[in-house]
């Protein structure tokens, strides 16, 4: 059982709901809310204390798009934690293709680069003992019903993966809906490579599925946002493409608590669905099991870490 956990992006959406569900478990003694905005973090902490009736929540300020901020957060964790939930990110803000100091696009820096540094530095400092969970998405293996194509890399070489990190893989300017799936695909591959390097803990990728009640669409262009919030919210649940916030976050909690979710794997919905029981996504997209491709993704990420 998980007693202590750090959740990034814990002041909204799935991260906050995951914090609520874990905070409600009687054996939980500490839930670190990893947030970049102190005011939003404090509001979430107060709300979580009120809804759970427990004082187990503590704020760790972290902007996962900034390596310095991530390293400061690792320093700030006073004692080893059982679990890490790498949940922050999503569509990469209002300018997902904007380049960071290291030449990475914002969408990649937020979802994968900062989380890789966080996970590896926690492990190096012996501050993570049981399980690390990365927030994946079915977009990583393609969602034809939503016109999100399966990522197709030419040879899946290190350079191919680097082109996802620096945005040159995509038509310019980089659009969130185009880059999101490839970045999350690469994330699942990198997490699988890290899992093989660290057999002492479980490292899993879990998609919460299509989840209502989050802010993930807020930064999308107005037309796309309008479609998802007004049309999508009515139609998607009928198509098995959307469930409630507590159901999405429960996927994280189930996978954290249950060792049957094995290290290195990526769990998400069955083919053509974004809800329902989770299955290993490599049964849908077999490249996810290719260890050479996983290692190439890992090496590409590390070209952006100094
Ligand atoms: N909702 C879905 O249907 C769905 C489906 C599949 C996967 N996912 C994945 O689930 C995760 C959570 O998504 P969500 O739907 O809950 O989104 P959300 O409601 O927008 O929440 C995202 C959280 O991440 C935080 N965040 C963003 N950039 C950050 C940064 N640089 N540093 C620290 N925190 C940052 C946000 O903080 P601020 O309040 O400061 O912006 C917020 O707390 C994402 O990784 C997303 O890709 C979501």
Image: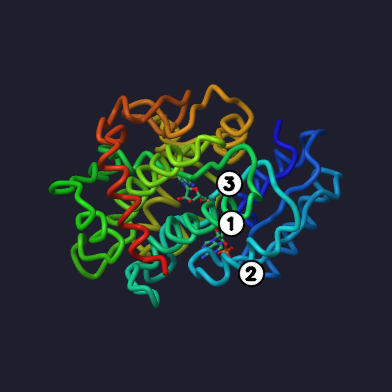
Position of 136 compared to 145: left or right? right
Residue 131 image offset from top left, x and y in percent = 59, 38
Name the quadrant of the C terminus.
bottom left
Residue at point 85% right, 50% down?
A: 55
State the CA–CA distance, disc 3 to disc 1.
9 Å
Most foreground residue, 33 or 243: 33
CA–CA distance in space, label 2 to label 3 = 18 Å
Q: Which residue is mark 3?
A: 85
Instruction: Say if mark 2 contacts mark 1, CB within 8 Å.
Output: no
Residue behind mark 1: 9
How is this picture coloured? rainbow
Which residue carries the number 2 mark? 37
Where is residue 264 shown, x and y percent of the image?
A: 43, 34
Q: Is residue 212 left or right of residue 142?
A: right
- The yes-or-no answer for disc 2 within 8 Å of ligand 1 is yes
User: Residue 83 placed where, x, y %?
Assistant: 64, 42
Asked if the residue at label 3 sits under 8 Å from ligand 1, the reply is no
Instruction: Tell which circle, 3 or 1, labels the residue nearer the N-terminal end.
Output: 1
| Spatial CA span between label 2 and label 1 | 10 Å
Seen at 38% across and 48% down, the residue is 187
The residue drawn where x is 46% and y is 26% is 278
């Amino acid at each position: 059982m998980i007693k202590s956990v750090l959740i990034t992006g814990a002041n909204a959406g799935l991260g906050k709901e995951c914090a609520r569900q874990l905070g409600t478990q009687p054996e939980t003694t500490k839930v670190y809310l990893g947030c970049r905005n102190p005011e939003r973090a404090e509001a979430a902490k107060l709300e979580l204390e009120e809804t759970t009736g427990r004082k187990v929540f503590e704020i760790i300020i972290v902007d996962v798009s900034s390596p310095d901020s991530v390293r400061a957060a690792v320093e700030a964790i006073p004692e080893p934690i059982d679990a890490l939930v790498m949940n922050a990110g999503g569509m990469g803000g209002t300018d997902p293709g904007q380049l960071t100091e290291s030449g990475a696009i914002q969408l990649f820096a937020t979802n994968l680069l900062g989380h890789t540094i966080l996970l590896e530095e926690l492990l190096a400092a012996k501050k993570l003992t049981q399980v690390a969970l990365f927030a994946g998405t079915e977009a990583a293996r393609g969602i034809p019903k939503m016109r999100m194509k399966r990522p197709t890399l030419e040879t899946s070489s290190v350079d191919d993966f680097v082109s996802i990190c620096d945005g040159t893989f995509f038509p310019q300017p980089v659009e969130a809906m185009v880059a999101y799936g490839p970045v999350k695909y690469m994330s699942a591959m990198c997490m699988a490579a890290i899992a093989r390097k660290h057999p002492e803990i479980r490292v899993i990728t879990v998609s919460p599925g299509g989840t209502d009640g989050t802010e993930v669409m807020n930064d999308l262009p107005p037309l796309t946002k309008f479609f998802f919030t007004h049309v999508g919210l009515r139609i998607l649940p009928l198509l098995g493409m959307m469930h409630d916030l507590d159901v999405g976050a429960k996927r994280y909690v189930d996978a954290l608590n249950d060792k049957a979710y094995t290290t290195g794997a990526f769990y998400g919905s069955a083919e053509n669905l974004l809800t329902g029981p989770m299955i290993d996504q490599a049964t849908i997209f077999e490249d996810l099991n290719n260890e050479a491709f996983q290692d190439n993704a890992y090496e590409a990420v590390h070209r952006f870490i100094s």
